[in-house]
Image (spheres, grey):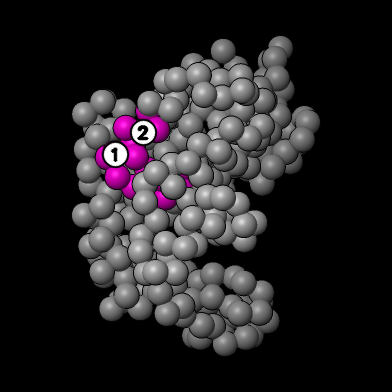
């Protein structure tokens, strides 16, 4: 079996940032972006690196990242029936119920770009949603051909609590070019100034300690049952998120491709 691997600038065929898209290996050509990947669920607290890893998965496999937050905003903006119902609830200070969220997810997963797979971001948030997703994938709800891998590949990024605090509270960004720094792990050459254009770096309000600590506590309360659900079904795979980012990516690719072997 031909396995994908990182390649240099001499790779044959198209190539993304990491050189994964096409590569001639011996007599065959490995093209991960044409594979059926199936659903991927990434679990992990704020600051664990899910966003970065999701982008790398999107580039390697050519599948979409689906965020429930984005779905909600899109439905509200387009004035769909689901969006109008959610907007009315939020206007009264209520939480959007599971049924509305699940209906939005169901509608999105029926789109053609999800045919080979997708990455779920922020869903499932509860054990009930995880059970709903399994039921959805077990039934023939989709008009599209179903992916080879019906049940989700579930990966949790485990990061030490103190490391998370340093990652999040140490984040700084350049309002001009958008470059991200971390005062603890990836500081600028000149304290407080962007390396690219010298603009003063800023910290997001959401990255303040008094904001992030309750968010981490809420994540632990809400998401622990989801991890427990997938652990009971023997589908949860954990990755040490304290490793360098590229090492985490390598392990993530390996889990997905071993699952498809």
Q: Residues within 10 Å of mark 1 (few under 14, many from 20)?
A: some
Q: Residues within 10 Å of mark 2 (few under 14, many from 20)?
A: some
Please identify the residue farthest to the right as the structure is shown.
13
Q: Position of residue 198 (x, y in %)?
A: 64, 85
Residue depicted at 39% across the width and 44% down the height? 99
Residue tagged by mark 2?
132
Measure the alpha-carbon separation of dots 1 and 2. Answer: 6 Å
Judge whether residue 115 is colored magenta: no
Q: Residue 95 appears in which quarter of the rendering?
A: bottom left
Task: Depth check: give the residue in front, 178 or 10.
Answer: 178
Residue depicted at 66% across the width and 46% down the height? 17
Q: Position of residue 75 (x, y in %)?
A: 58, 54
Where are the magenta residues, as a range? 120-134
Pointers 1 and 2 in contact (C-beta within 8 Å): yes
In the rendered image, the quadrant that contains the N terminus is top right
Instruction: Say left or right for 86 vs 44.
Output: right
Q: Is residue 259 visible?
A: no
Q: How many marks?
A: 2
Instruction: Give the vertical position of 181 relative to 131 (above or below).
Output: below
Residue tagged by mark 1?
128
Instruction: Say left or right for 81 vs 228.
Output: right
Query: In terms of secondary structure, where does tag 2 sit?
Result: helix
Judge whether residue 132 is colored magenta: yes
Task: Depth check: give the residue in front, 60 or 245.
Answer: 60
Task: Depth check: give the residue in front, 60 or 96.
Answer: 96
Instruction: Say left or right for 130 vs 111.
Output: left
Query: In terms of secondary structure, where does tag 1 sit?
Result: helix
Residue depicted at 26% across the width and 25% down the height? 234
């Amino acid at each position: 079996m031909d396995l994908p691997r990182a390649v240099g600038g001499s790779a044959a065929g198209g190539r993304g940032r990491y050189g994964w898209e096409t590569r001639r290996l011996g007599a065959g050509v490995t093209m991960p972006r044409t594979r059926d990947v199936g659903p991927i669920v990434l679990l992990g607290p704020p600051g664990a690196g899910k966003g970065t890893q999701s982008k790398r998965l999107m580039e390697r496999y050519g599948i979409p990242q689906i965020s429930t937050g984005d779905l909600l905003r899109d439905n509200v903006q387009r004035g769909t029936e689901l969006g109008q119902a959610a907007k009315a609830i939020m206007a009264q200070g209520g939480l959007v119920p599971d049924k509305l969220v699940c209906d939005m997810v169901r509608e999105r997963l029926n789109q053609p770009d999800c045919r080979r797979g997708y990455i779920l971001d922020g869903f499932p948030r509860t054990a009930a949603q995880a059970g709903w997703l399994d039921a959805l994938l077990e039934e023939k709800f989709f008009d599209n051909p179903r992916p080879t891998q019906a049940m989700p590949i579930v990966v949790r990024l485990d990061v030490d609590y103190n490391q998370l605090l340093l990652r999040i509270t140490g984040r700084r960004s350049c309002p001009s070019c958008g470059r991200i720094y971390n005062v603890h792990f990836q500081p600028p050459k000149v304290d407080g100034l962007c390396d690219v254009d010298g603009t003063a770096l800023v910290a997001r309000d959401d990255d303040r300690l008094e904001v992030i600590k309750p968010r981490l506590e809420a994540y632990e309360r809400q998401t622990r049952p989801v991890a427990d659900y997938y652990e009971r079904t023997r589908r949860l795979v954990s990755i040490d998120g304290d490793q360098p980012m590229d090492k985490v990516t390598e392990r993530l690719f390996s889990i997905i491709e071993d699952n498809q072997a």
